[in-house]
Amino acid sequence: MRAIRDINSAPAKYSGSDRAEMPANKPLIAKVSGVSKDSVEYRLSQSGLGEDGMGLITVHPPSVEGRKFGPKSAELTDKGIRVLSALDEREESSTETIDQEEIKQLRARLDAIESTEFGEEDEVSAGKVVGQLEQVQTRIDELESMVEGNIQRFNEQLDELEARLDGEWGAVDTETAEDIGRTLNLSPVLFMLWSEVFGVDVRELVLQETITDELKAETQEDVLTAIERGLNGTGEVGGGSEISDVSRGSIPQQEESAAQGDGSDGQAELDETGSETTNADISPPDST
């Protein structure tokens, strides 16, 4: 989050800040923050820091540069700016300035009262001073308790946030982190598989906010066409592809005919005179 803030607030200081919609793009965030690009990708997409989760950052999709995708970029939301400011203040001071100043003044007053010397004739005044002393001490205890409680709640909230920010993959276990890493490593291979082998325009799918039924049908048709073209190239399937017939719910004609039978099994045969002839009426030739 600090890297995103720093880059967007002074883009001229960073080389490569003009590659996306916002200066803070994924490669530059990785470089400035000192974490891997995969880790930045996870934190931008799945860590829960985005608008669908904690609402601390806004992620802009990759820009299209010719036939290639540019990097993702990000910026802090108003809430993200406030939270990051609170984190910075926590590092600078662990107490609330106003309350600490009041405690400081009360302690000075307490010390002044305790150092006062009274004679026998000042017994009444001494009693009043003791009462004031107790009131001041009570107020100090109340303020210290309030400050301690506020600091504790504040630290708990920030600890929850830091748990998401610390580590390579944020607040996930080792097994989940390994799964994420394997998935990201396979992404280029899967992109080439779908775009080059099956002819699916993956870039178009990425840019769509909603995958409609029509888009699903078009994508399925592209995959089917690619499979048919591949089989035609090997000579396994002729011009009228059986895959197309099966995929559209029809059965090739010869299979349908075979399934229905030719109508001759189990029926009695008629001889030339029109009389019925069965297998029992046919005698084997005389061997003699």
Image: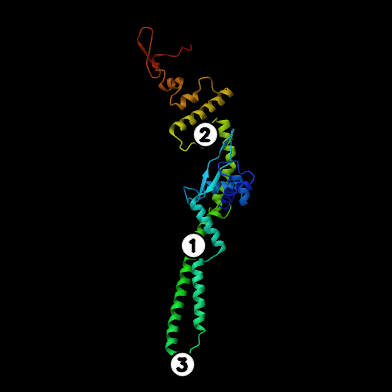
Residue drawn at x 55%, y 54% is 165
Of marks 2 and 1, which one's residue comes earlier in the chain? 1
Residue type, label 2: Glu
Front label number (2 vs 3): 3
Seen as rendered, the residue at the extreme front is 121
State the image quarter where residue 229 is shown: top right
Of marks 2 and 3, which one's residue comes earlier in the chain? 3
Of marks 3 and 1, which one's residue comes earlier in the chain? 3
Residue type, label 3: Glu
Residue type, label 1: Phe
> What residue sits right under mark 3 in the picture?
120
Between 155 and 136, the one lying in front of the other is 136
Circle count:
3
Mark 3 to mark 1: distance in Å?
A: 50 Å
**53 lies left or right of 9:** left
> What residue sits right under mark 1 in the picture?
154
State the image quarter where residue 71 is shown: top right
Q: Position of residue 189 (x, y in %)?
A: 59, 37
Q: Secondary structure at mark 2?
A: helix
> What residue sits right under mark 2 in the picture?
204
